[in-house]
Image: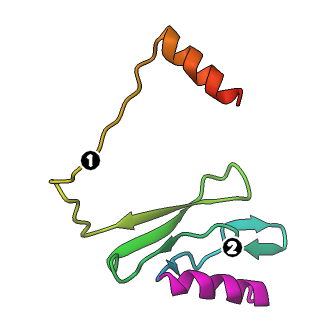
Amino acid sequence: MLCTTVFSYKYISLLTSYNLNSVIDFPTRIHNTSNTLIDNIFINKITNANYSVYPLIDGLSDHDAQALRLFDIIVPTDRNELYSYKEISTQSLNEFQANLSY
């Protein structure tokens, strides 16, 4: 964070307690005489130690985007996923509407 206030210290402390750390250390909004960091990206730097972050300056406004690139990510291929679905019919829509009225 660019500005250090009591609120920002508490905010950072809370996120750090969940092992989340800010990776943005540059202004994300530049306007006339002020530079502010109003956008943040928080990651777990222990599990994501290899990353890069940079501004995306498009010139369309005083507010810039940020890009985060994570390297060395291992995505499990044998994920157990649960899929559910709901049949859409006149009866199911009527039941849904009836349940909303309670």
At 54% from the left and 69% from the top, the residue drawn is 41
* Res. 82 in view: yes
* Res. 1 in view: no
Q: Vertical placement of 69 versus 10: above or below?
A: above
- Horizontal arrangement in the rendering, residue 67 relative to residue 98 (left or right): left
Q: Specify the farthest residue to the right.
A: 33
User: Of residues 80 and 86, which is closer to you in this image?
Assistant: 86
Q: Vertical placement of 79 versus 101: above or below?
A: below
The residue where tag 2 is placed is 37
As measured in the structure, the alpha-carbon distance from the residue carrying label 1 to the one carrying label 2 is 38 Å
The residue where tag 1 is placed is 81
Query: Considering the image in quadrants, where does the C terminus appear?
Result: top right
Q: From the top left corner, tell me how far across and down residue 23 is, in percent.
A: 51, 77
Q: Nearer the viewer, mark 1 or mark 2?
A: 1
- Horizontal arrangement in the rendering, residue 98 relative to residue 74 (left or right): right
Which amino acid does the dot numbered 1 rest on?
A: Glu
Helix, strand or loop under label 2: loop
Stretch of the chain drawn in magenta: 1-18
